[in-house]
Image (cartoon, rainbow, N blue to C red):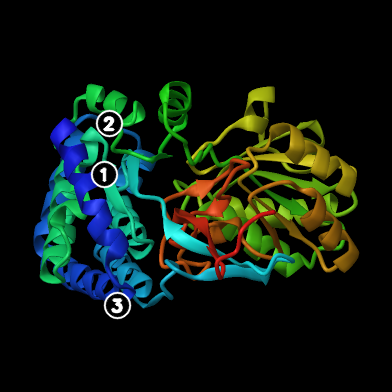
Amino acid sequence: MRALGARARAAAQAVREAPGEQRSAALAAIADALAAMQDDILSSNSADVKAAQARALTPAFIDRLTLTPARFEAMVAGVRTIAALPDPVGAVTASWTGPQGLAFSRVRTPIGVIGIIFESRPNVAADAGALSLRAGNCVILRGGSDSVRSVAAIGEALRRGLARAGLPADAIQIVPSPDRAAVGMMLAGLYGAIDVIVPRGGKSLVARVQDEARVPVFAHLDGVCHTYVHAGADPEKAVAVTVNAKMRRVSVCGATETLLIDRAAAPALLPRIAAALREAGCTLRGDEDARAIVAMDAASEEDWGAEYLDAILSVRIVQGLEEAIAHIARYGSAHTDAIITEDDAAADAFLKRVDSAIVLHNASTQFADGGEFGFGGEIGIATGRLHARGPVGAEQLTIFKYVVRGDGTVRP
């Protein structure tokens, strides 16, 4: 691990100084290498999935682990999108001239070496590697033990692409050991090699990272996401958006976990929404008022803060906008929350007052994805308050420095 960190730190300077065109070429070569290795990668993933099934892991976990051909193609397409993105390194975000005649510029610059610790999703290796490279960074990837074969195969493709473009293969490295001690070393900074840590996984992983990290962390908390059906909602939109937000893919962090619906709209809308959800295979857990309208399981206090990552949805009747916002503030995880309404004033109030990383109007919470934002991918949805928030793409993986130009200027 010490040698791995030293190699990453040595590669960081070369990647930082490489022209954007060379990093674009490397990303295109990575996409080509991934496509060429499709059979090997999918075979490795199949072995990981079979091992997970033999251990009787949950369907939601296995879904996150599985690389279908369609998901593989989307992963490769994401890398190609990242290759075509504008290079953030060197971009001037502000400039001005001071009264003393100095010319000031704020310029984007790479972070350096990023450590990314993730669990079951093997595609994170490709997304994170590509985004880090786009932003001029090196990356050390530590996947979960359940995806070890998949991540190793993807990592080989990433390194082949780097080498073909003349960049150090060590700019993207996979931690070779499943030992949890390797995670501890990364959290301690890997002997000064790692500048920032990004956790991508469940509560226990994120909690460990936040408790033990000795370097800055881009926090990604659980996705307790809400869809709020306001009294002014269009019924067709309310049904379609709610079903998509919950059931398109239940294992993603942007899946809606709680439906809030206004009391004035509930008698007419809740039966329609519930029927559509049940037809899609969803189990409902409601408060007393919801159960008086539609028969469903009783929701407990724990349900309001639950990230099910499963075909389960909690349902609560609220008096209106104020109560919906208060519920989200109390039980949400500041991830992604949506309002369904044709009332623009209500929508504007919701978008302004709900303090989540992503807020939506008349759209599914499943759009909480860097690819949908045009970032080509993401290494997580940051829910913290510092540096990056929302989908963490290439731009969010840069920091900045101030460049100051004078002409023999001295300070009096």
- Residue at 35 percent across and 56 percent down: it is 132
Under circle 1, the secondary element is: strand
Under circle 3, the secondary element is: helix
Q: Where is residue 231 in the image (x, y as percent from the top left)?
A: 87, 57
Q: In this view, does 41 lie above or below 180?
A: below
Q: Label 3, label 1: how many angstroms apart (C-alpha)?
A: 23 Å
What amino acid is labelled 3 in the image?
Glu
Q: Specify whether 38 is left or right of 253.
A: left
Q: Which mark is residue 190?
A: 2
Label 1 crowd (10 A; few <14 / some 14-19 / many >=20): many
First-in-chain label (3 vs 1): 3
Q: Residue 287 carries which label?
A: none
Q: Where is residue 337 in the image (x, y as percent from the top left)?
A: 67, 51
Q: Residue 21 carries which label?
A: 3
Q: Label 1, label 2: how many angstroms apart (C-alpha)?
A: 10 Å
What amino acid is labelled 1 in the image?
Ile
**Closer mark to the observer between disc 3 and disc 1:** 3
Q: Label 3, label 2: how many angstroms apart (C-alpha)?
A: 30 Å
Q: Specify whether 270 is left or right of 120.
A: right
- Residue at 26 percent across and 39 percent down: it is 142
Would you say residue 282 is visible in this rendering?
A: yes
**Closer mark to the observer between disc 1 and disc 2:** 2
Label 2 near label 1: C-beta < 8 Å?
A: yes
Name the residue carrying label 1: 140
Label 1 near label 3: C-beta < 8 Å?
A: no
